[in-house]
Image: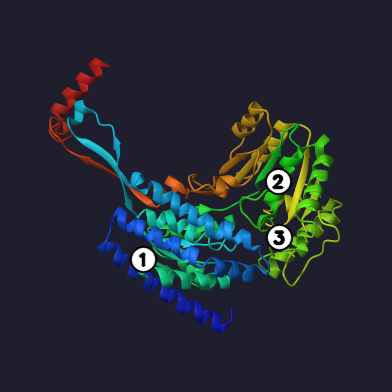
Amino acid sequence: MSTSASMHDAEAISSLEAAFVMQRAAFAKDRRPSIGVRQERLGALIGMMLANRERISAAVAQDFGAHPVPASDLIEVLGVVGRAQHVLEHLEDWMVPSPRHTDTAMLGTATAQIEYQPKGVVGNIVPWNFPFDLSVGPMVDMLAAGNRVIVKPSEYTPACADLLAEMVAATFDPDLVTVAVGGLELARAFSSIPWDHLLYTGSPAVGRQVMQAAAANLTPVTLELGGKCPAILTPGSVTEANVESVIGTKLIKSGQMCVSVDYALVPREDLETFVTHAASFMARAAPNYSRGEECTGMISPRHLQRIEDMLEEAQAAQCRIVTLEEDGQIDFKTRRMPMSLAIDPSQDLRIMQEEIFGPILPVVPYDNLDMALDAINAGERPLGLYVFGNDLALTNHVLASTHSGGAAVNTCAIQSALPSMGFGGSGMSGMGRHHGIEGFREFSNPRGVVVRGEGDLIDVFYAPYAKAAGLVQAVLAGS
């Protein structure tokens, strides 16, 4: 790290610590914002996103080298707005305390309920692949739950980070929401702050480090990680529409998406049909993919080199590579590259051992579906799992026989985009949920409250225990 970068991070860490202290003090003065205040904050968030729509698209394109404007509008802007609108529609109901049963024989007229109170000051470490969707999106849940928020954008998206900081500063007081911009040292310091809750989205390797740092303060964490998400095409399901769904999903961000299809499992007799449908779809939908406006660039030269190396390793191992673009070439200036299929790759290749996060789709033939499911279960649990087929019993069998953070039938990745559905992982793909009521509850403390009434037997718990002994005997005699 250069001296100037180190000095910048030192200043950023100092600013972060000051912002945390300021937000803690502000929360202490307002521990339970009203429904009206929360609605006002969410309304301001919606206005912020819509007012900066064009600037958001420009910043995303600048950081990625190339990025489709409609994709930025749809995911980074309207996806966040839709999420906030859903929360606004339901927040009043979510804030209502949830009553719990009491034993009237023991507690008389007492009442019990769960009250969802704000946790306090929440941190959010954001990845580079969706710099606004994964920063402002979770902020919706955090603000809805009544918290204060500090966001750490990725250093790989500097244009987006600077714009986000500007947008937030113009919309919210810093004691409510602020953005900490900096590099690796700031990221490490961020995890060590004694947050009331910490969200991290990224790789499992860094997730371990974040969780370890958070453990020193017993900070509760939500980890959204990733993994090798499979698409399982059951016998008879290798149709044009289903292959289009798989390839179309893989094209989103050029595969740089944690719920993208990482590999496809296909009946061996339908392998060539899959390849034919994939090539046909690309020729029709994006014939000049890597040279056109539909293609997102790799986030950095280093990541582009990583994807190249994985492809070259597969080729050197005599794996058949099908490039789904005539005369497709890598554009090093914009970091765009063609979409490729890797047919029947060896399991020891990097494309089968690592999450790819790029425009390579391994297509793995199988002879027996249950054996294919066993192979999935032998690995780590993926963030998403996708099964295709019209036989309901068979698709249900696949779902019942596997484990994943989320799943979809006859489509891919959409489970991560529903404002009403909690999104998260399992095992190595993460823990905890955000989106919808699950997100509201994730960033709330579900405090159980009992209000004593009349006619109870609470005093049997106090010494002397003669009354307790009599009660126990009566209960046992009547059971």
Residue 156 in view? no
Checking the image for residue 358, the label placed there is none
**Quadrant assignment, res 139:** bottom left
Q: Residue 44: give x, y in percent of width and height.
A: 40, 63
**Residue positioned 18% across, 25% down in the render:** 469
Q: Residue 403: give x, y in percent of width and height.
A: 59, 38
Separation (CA) of disc 2 from disc 3: 16 Å
Separation (CA) of disc 1 from disc 3: 37 Å
Q: Secondary structure at mark 3?
A: loop
Q: Which amino acid, by three-letter code, is at mark 3?
A: Glu
Which residue corresponds to mark 3? 294
Point out the frontmost of discs 1 and 3.
3
Q: Quadrant of the N terminus?
A: bottom right
Q: Is residue 334 left or right of residue 418?
A: right
Checking the image for residue 176, the label placed there is 1
**Quadrant assignment, res 4:** bottom right
Q: Indicate whether 165 appears above or below 213.
A: below
Q: Residue 270: give x, y in percent of width and height.
A: 81, 37
Which residue occupies the foreground of this view, 172 or 335?
Answer: 172
Which residue corresponds to mark 2? 246
Label 1 crowding class (10 Å Cα cut-off): few <14, some 14-19, many 20+?
A: many
* Mark before the other along the chain sequence, 2 or 1: 1
**Residue positioned 46% across, 65% down in the render:** 48
**Residue positioned 73% across, 44% down in the render:** 264
